[in-house]
Image (cartoon, coloured by chain):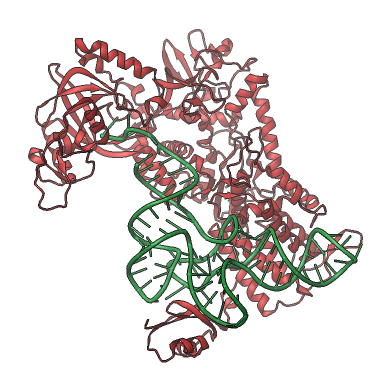
Amino acid sequence: MASQRKQFPFSDFEPNWQSRWLADAAFRAPNPGDADFDPGKPKYYVLDMFPYPSGEGLHVGHVEGYTATDIIARFKRMRGFNVLHPMGWDAFGLPAEQFAIKTGQHPRVTTERNIARFRTQLQSIGFSYDWTREFSTTDPDYFRWTQWIFLKLYNSWFNPRTRKAEPMETYEGDDADSVRLAYVAEMPVNWCPALGTVLANEEVVDGKSEVGGHPVERRPMRQWMLRITSYAERLIDELEGLDWPEGIKLLQRNWIGRSEGALVKFGIADLGKEIEVFTTRPDTLFGATYMVLSPEHPLVREVTTPDRIAAVEVYQREVGSKSDLERTELTKEKTGVFTGAYARNPVNDERIPIWIADYVLMGYGTGAIMAVPAHDERDFEFATKFGLEIRQVVREAGRGGQPDFAPFPEALEAAFCGEGIAMNSALLDGLPTPEAKVKIVAWLEQKGLGRGTVNYKLRDWLFSRQRYWGEPFPIVWKEGRHRALGESELPVVQPELEDFKPTGTPEPPLSKVRDWLNYSEEAKRETNTMPQWAGSCWYYLRFCDPKNRARFVGKDAETYWMTGKANSDMQGPRAGGVDLYVGGTEHAVLHLLYARFWHKVLFDLGYLSTPEPFQRLVNQGIILGPDNQKMSKSRGNVVNPENVIAEYGADSLRLYEMFMGPLEQMKPWSMKGVEGVYRFLGRVWRLVMEETQEGDWSVSPELAEIELNNRQLRLAHVTVKKVTEDIESFDFNTAISQMMIFTNEFVNSRPRPVAGLRTLLPLLSPFAPHMAEELWERLGEKFSGFEGRASSQDWPPYDEGLLAVDEVEYGVQINGKVRDRMLARKDASDAELEKSALATPKVRDAVAGKPVLKIIIVRDKLVNIVLAK
RNA sequence: GCCGGCGUGGCGGAACUGGCAGACGCGCACGACUCAAAAUCGUGUUCCCUUCGGGAGUGUGGGUUCGAUCCCCUCCGCCGGCACCA
């Protein structure tokens, strides 16, 4: 427990400074066109992943990332940047709707209450947000533009020739709906009868709903989709230039899942039809001994022979009733049935049987494969189980004397999936895998039997939800056809609803509101709503110009905050975006991929000046409970920032979260650790303040206008340098260590030089802004040089010249182990260093007449004497 | 299974580009102040043997190097992601 008496009166001055900052909008960022806009300043846009304002209130995990960005924002302001540091609310979402279903409380009411609580909490930590830019994704003034962007998607297509989104007007084909970036499709979705809604894949855990653990079933429904797959290639390629953690880039690349291969056509014997397969190993085509279709493949019905129909239908029903979980069970044995049909292998015209099996997924490639059991583990397992032929067509390379032919089939105990040398493959025999691929693809293309292609794992984005609390679609239906509303009809606002209960059917709740539903005599409104991701896909753009009523973001504001050009006519490189984006890894793929996708569409259509939204990304690590376990209510190890503030103050909370360890690392909470930084802040306080008889605080009489001694002066410059560099490299923990060292030096100095505080307080102010402001102001009552506020000072400079010392301590090593130390002049020559190293007592003893083989000198660090062993 | 990250004192962590391992903080011990306690201040604190002094040491085992927490290989453990993607 902390002491009952506070070390410094944080509960007085912290709220005081918070309201003063708010009252004079201290951290308002002027936009181009504003009276106080200074075009001479460079811009810096530092953004947090805005929170979903849950009923739980702010979490220490939020505070970690938000403190890091706040330090950067405050630092950059002091370095002369025009800093955009905004905050808002990602407030559509299931919890508010669930609460509404349970209590009848309108989600808007719950949401507003939660937002108010979050805002109060954030303000009580002293974050320097520009609160004049605050908005919620649930504000009609915001989501009208979310709907507007949807219209852009709806009215655009991806032109594969230009590799860009273009307005529908440039499309010359005759089926516009087949190319729109927003389209309707009948799709199997995760339907949760208990919750009365579909769920996103990420909301389904182990076949059950993440909320409540209710069973989820697959059922086909009419859904809105976004054609993100057309951007697959660019979403991979354009990661290149981003300053993101490599791990996150890799996660995105894997998610998009690019693989190079070929499409190959297999004729169906006797039917005059073809089945196309995708393979990454066209070089193994001669080893294809059977084919497998996904049970859902549209050709299954046609190819199945009459005697196999019963068996095939039984299998299809079996598979259809399985959940995704059961179907992807790893330990599961392969299953499948023969269709009775045969295909012709295009390379050798062999008749091969066509099977169906659920290990072939309809959603990837063409939903059909050629099976090469000798060189694919899954095919091998399947062929072994069903007694299908296994023919080796690749052998391991490297062992020279090996014959091109391996006896069949005993030679293979398992599939050989690596690269090697082709065998039993006619024209490919003897070729290494990469060359064999090229050759066979060329051959297929020449014969018109196939072609090289690239395939992606990424699927189109299921964009509709059967919910009330989300953005309605600006779409109406008439005679079974959809039509976009005009921009002038936005926003489309949800109607009021009394009963939020699900309909009990897959019909969305909005379908219950007859008046709203009927757009006109003939036309009905779309009743689905957008998923929660929609609002977070472009909020960083709205922050540039949140009050704009004519445009989703003003051109000049967007250009300035994204590229630094003060107006949109200025030419410049097409790089930029948010300068720094900090948040958790949980959004490594979905949010960051979706936002990049929308951004690219808007960029292609000419609305934006950069192709990417977030230039630099940093992930904060998870904060664990004091027991080293993930914080959770059930474990009872959740730390509430409000309690920490009450006991130690906001500055201690901020400082501790930064002192715990590297930002990106996972680390456990420790109240003892909070006390440690609290004591440090207490020492800083007492550097300046002294407690009077009456228990008040007044400026310490020990403070005086005296010069720093040499040691202090050097330490001051070392500290400025270290803190400056550490902030720039996000090493906040070591920056704080250095300020502790600095403070400790002055604690016992009497009298104390005031100049030390002119250095320390500005350095401290990004970290512990309340204390810095308070002490700065108090000092100003007694000393000069404390004008204005700590937070608006220029960042202190340092003088490299003053960092130098005349004498350096060297470690003296013998064969790489430190045996002695010595002091040497900074400018000592190598010869002098060698001489004095050899003269140290330990070295004299050790050498004792042995030959010195070599002496290695590392300037300012060590001298290593190498002796024969 | 595949991909990625991480293993340093009793604990959180520090150590630049291969150059004195353990900064800073916590905890602990002792001391000062105090009638006493708290708070504060000071000293010490990687481990082992010890009087001096010596030895070992960054998950394990090896390698490269004058020198390895750092680079390479092996294995072990923890965390995260993906998971029949042809």
Where is B74 relative to A235, above or below? below
In what quadrant of the picture does the C terminus of chain A appear?
bottom left
Q: Is residue A784 left or right of residue A398?
A: right
**Which residue sits at x=60%, y=53%?**
A73
Question: Image point 58% across, 36% down: which residue?
Answer: A548
Q: Which chain is red?
A: A
Could you tell me if residue A268 is visible in this image?
yes
Q: Nearer the viewer, residue A824 or A767?
A: A824
In the rendered structure, the answer to whether residue A749 lies left or right of residue A66 reads right
Horizontal and vertical percent position of residue A491:
56, 25
How many numbered marks are there? 0
Residue furthest out toward the top: A521
Q: Position of residue A163 (x, y in %)?
A: 32, 38
Could you say which is closer to the camera, residue A483 or residue A512? A512
Judging depth in this view, the residue of B26 and A240 nearest the camera is: B26
User: The chain drawn green is chain what?
Assistant: B
Q: Residue at x 27, y 18 (%)?
A: A298
Up/down of A682 relative to A819, above or below: above
Task: Locate residue A829, reporting x and y percent.
Answer: 46, 88
Percent from the top left, x then y, of residue A538? Answer: 51, 37
Q: Looking at the picture, does residue A718 appear above or below residue A432? A: below
Whether A131 is drawn above or below A157: the answer is below
